[in-house]
């Protein structure tokens, strides 16, 4: 048979089947029967098997999955995937609008979209074809799950109409309620445990190693945002319309609103009607429509200022309070946890809930055996919100918050103006000691493998570890005295501890566990001050001058370094060989990583200020240029990069980096230099 005829036949079938897929899964307007569709699909599959040279990666037959993926590679987002600020009342929304109006000259329009309860995904398209699918992860990087996402019928493998050469479509992978119920019915017939809720099932499905198994599950993808350069529109509303034209599934419930009154009307409508939707939703996302106004508003460290998520009122159920335990974390805060008679709430079975603090316990007048009302704060964390006093047993005992630490017996202290109570026996309270060591060895800190919670508890109980510095004095003889630890395991532990000495300063700083210093802030402090000594000697005024560093954080840092025990700990870690600086004070410019390299920063950076980023380049021997020219080696781009990025793309030999790439390159150099 003529190969040209075969190729034309395959292309015709691909086009027909893709069109039928689009009509069925996106438009919900099928024009042929399932049987007719299956016949065409089998015909195409047979032709592709006979003529594999004509098989296209975007063929409808490639959605069935196949092959195992043992490890999902990590992929750095070219544009950070931010989380949204939450609003729980009209007052919250009105305050957000006030903040918006202060920064804008013109009154904005708003786009309201339902907040889908699923797993965020980033879909990269090149020349109209799906190139890569990446989960949100921590916002900076996520797991590449392309092989699994390709099986989702509402994700177009090839786009329709006219589109940019490259862009990113962001959406939510969901499991419709009907499909979720069908999956549970099948498990029920087999005598298997039921899936807890659609969202968790979706998340687990995307991590399945066998894409053929993913293809059997009725996942759906709802697109809510388009990101890229040289886009064909200038507003969010236009973006959604274009996304529909290209073949993406965009729910029609969204609405363009002229003012906040129309926004409230939209919320009121869907708070009542959301139960009629075919999928779970927990709120409404409100976005400023015009991209120009979005750019003017910009971002905070965590969220875009031009968008907010209004959360619907949560479901509330009543169940019996069986007991209350008081748990202690590494920071010394004592947290009351309620143990409940199991009850179903929001699709999951709840057995425990938060009681917040002593004030809440007293305010609610909680007694053991009470019938308590439970809801999920932000639809996630169960909490007790009220007590049915009329149902209280006659001899019920009142729940009392302890005056002593439940772990070590030390007196609990409550700082003025604070609700939490603390155990300040930092050096003698087992949960605090073990918790600090667990944090120190964790993946995002020193990343010491083979030292899990159970192993660290055994080491502490045996007297081998009293603080984080003791890790670097462990010997194989000491480790082998612990039951269940063999010689090979001991060697692996010691090797992991040795390798941790090469971790960069920013990770060491985060690993110290200074209160309020998270991963991003540790990075900011490390690159701004460049050494632990500079941070220790920094004044309060120098601290709060930094973006994202307020009085609470500055006071926490100064309090940490005021303690002799912490200074002694740092001395021991320094002697063990850990990195406590970005560079030597006598680091010559000819020895720097960026020696004789030129840099320029454009757009809004997420982790560093422009000044901090430029100071980092200078500290490593590099040079900062004022504009794009042939002399520029690297352009580092942040959010909303503009003309500089466009100009750099026209010139040869200029390498374009994201902020993440810039920081990762520095960290990799510092790690290798320390070895």
Image (cartoon, grey):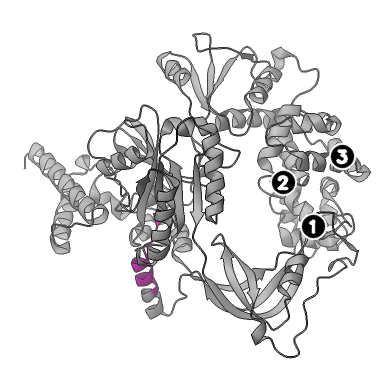
Foreground: 204 or 382?
A: 382
Rendered position, 233 above or below 327: above
Rendered position, 152 above or below 6: below
Provide the residue designation for mark 1.
Answer: 434
Q: Secondary structure at mark 3?
A: helix
Left of 158 or right of it: where is 444? right
Provide the residue designation for mark 3.
Answer: 561
State the residue at coordinates (79%, 54%).
Answer: 331
Q: Secondary structure at mark 2?
A: helix
Residue at the far front: name it: 261
Distance from Cα at disc 2 to Cα at disc 3: 28 Å
State the residue at coordinates (6%, 39%).
Answer: 2
Q: Is residue 208 magenta?
A: no
Q: Nearer the viewer, mark 2 or mark 3?
A: 3
State the residue at coordinates (24%, 51%).
Answer: 61
- Mark 2 surroundings within 10 Å by alpha-carbon count, few (fewer than 14), some (14 through 19), many (20 or more): some
- Mark 3 surroundings within 10 Å by alpha-carbon count, few (fewer than 14), some (14 through 19), many (20 or more): some
- x then y, percent, for residue 455: 75, 60
State the residue at coordinates (21%, 40%).
Answer: 53
Q: Which residues are magenta?
A: 174-184
Pointer 2 and pointer 3: residues touching (CB < 8 Å)? no
Rendered position, 379 above or below 587: below
Q: Earlier in the sequence, mark 2 or mark 3?
A: 2
- Mark 1 surroundings within 10 Å by alpha-carbon count, few (fewer than 14), some (14 through 19), many (20 or more): many
Q: Nearer the viewer, mark 1 or mark 2?
A: 1
Provide the residue designation for mark 2.
Answer: 496
Rendered position, 516 above or below 635: below
Left of 74 or right of it: where is 458? right
- x then y, percent, for residue 318: 58, 78
Left of 130 or right of it: where is 642? right
Q: Secondary structure at mark 1?
A: helix
């Amino acid at each position: 048979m003529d190969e040209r005829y075969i190729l034309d036949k395959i292309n015709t079938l691909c086009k027909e089947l893709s069109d039928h897929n689009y009509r069925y899964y996106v438009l919900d307007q099928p024009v042929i029967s399932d049987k007719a569709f299956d016949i065409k699909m089998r015909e195409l599959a047979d032709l592709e098997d006979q003529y594999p040279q004509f098989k296209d990666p975007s063929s409808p037959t490639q959605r069935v999955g196949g092959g195992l993926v043992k490890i999902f590679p990590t992929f750095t987002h070219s544009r950070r995937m931010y989380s949204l600020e939450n609003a729980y009342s009209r007052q919250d929304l009105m305050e957000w609008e006030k903040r918006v109006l202060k920064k804008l000259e013109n009154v904005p329009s708003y786009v309201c979209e339902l907040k889908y309860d699923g797993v965020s995904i980033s879909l990269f398209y090149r020349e109209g074809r799906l190139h890569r699918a990446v989960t949100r992860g921590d916002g900076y990087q996520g797991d590449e799950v392309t092989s699994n996402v390709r099986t989702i019928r509402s994700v177009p493998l090839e786009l329709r109409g006219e589109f940019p050469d490259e862009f990113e479509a962001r959406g939510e992978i969901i499991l419709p309620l009907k499909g979720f119920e069908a999956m549970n019915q099948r498990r029920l017939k087999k005598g298997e445990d039921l899936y807890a809720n659609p969202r968790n099932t979706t998340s687990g499905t995307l991590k399945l190693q066998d894409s053929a198994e993913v293809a059997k599950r009725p996942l759906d993808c709802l697109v809510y945002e388009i990101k890229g350069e040289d886009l064909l529109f200038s507003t969010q509303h236009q973006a959604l319309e274009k996304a529909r034209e290209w073949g993406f599934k965009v729910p029609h419930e969204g609405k363009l609103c002229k003012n906040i009154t129309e926004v409230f009307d939209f919320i009121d409508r869907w708070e009542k009607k959301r139960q009629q939707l075919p999928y779970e939703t927990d709120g409404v996302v409100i976005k400023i429509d015009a991209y120009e106004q979005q750019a003017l508003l910009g971002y905070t460290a965590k969220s875009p200022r031009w968008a907010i998520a209004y959360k619907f009122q949560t479901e509330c159920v009543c169940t019996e309070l069986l007991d209350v335990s008081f748990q202690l974390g590494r920071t010394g805060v004592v947290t009351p946890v309620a143990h409940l008679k199991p009850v179903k709430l929001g699709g999951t079975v709840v057995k425990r809930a938060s009681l917040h603090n002593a004030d809440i316990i007293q305010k609610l007048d909680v007694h053991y055996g009470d019938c308590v009302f439970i809801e999920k704060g932000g639809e996630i964390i169960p909490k007790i919100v009220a007590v049915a006093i009329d149902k209280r047993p006659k001899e019920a005992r009142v729940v009392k918050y302890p005056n002593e630490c439940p772990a070590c017996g030390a007196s609990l202290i409550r700082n003025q103006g604070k609700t939490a109570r603390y155990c300040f026996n930092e050096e003698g309270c087992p949960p605090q000691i073990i918790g600090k060591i667990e944090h120190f060895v964790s993946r995002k800190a020193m990343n010491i493998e083979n030292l899990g919670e159970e192993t660290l508890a055994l080491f502490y109980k045996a007297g081998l570890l009293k603080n984080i510095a003791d890790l670097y004095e462990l010997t194989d003889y000491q480790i082998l005295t612990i039951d269940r630890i063999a010689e090979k395991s001991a060697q692996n532990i010691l090797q992991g501890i040795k390798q941790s000495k090469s971790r960069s300063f920013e990770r060491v700083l985060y690993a110290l566990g200074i209160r309020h210093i998270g991963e991003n802030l540790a990075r900011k402090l490390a690159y701004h001050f460049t050494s632990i000594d500079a941070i220790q000697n920094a004044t309060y005024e120098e601290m709060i001058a930094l973006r994202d560093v307020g009085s609470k954080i500055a006071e926490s840092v100064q309090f940490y370094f005021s303690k002799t025990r912490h200074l002694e700990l740092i001395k021991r870690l320094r002697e063990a060989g850990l990195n406590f600086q970005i560079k030597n004070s006598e680091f010559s410019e000819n020895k720097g990583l960026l020696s004789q390299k030129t840099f320029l920063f454009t757009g809004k950076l997420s982790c560093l200020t422009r000044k901090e980023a430029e100071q980092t380049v200078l500290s490593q021997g590099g040079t900062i240029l004022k504009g794009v020219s042939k002399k520029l080696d690297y352009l580092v781009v942040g959010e909303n990069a503009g003309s500089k990025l466009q100009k750099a793309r026209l010139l040869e030999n200029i390498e374009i980096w994201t902020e993440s790439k810039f920081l990762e390159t520095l960290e990799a150099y510092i790690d290798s230099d320390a070895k």
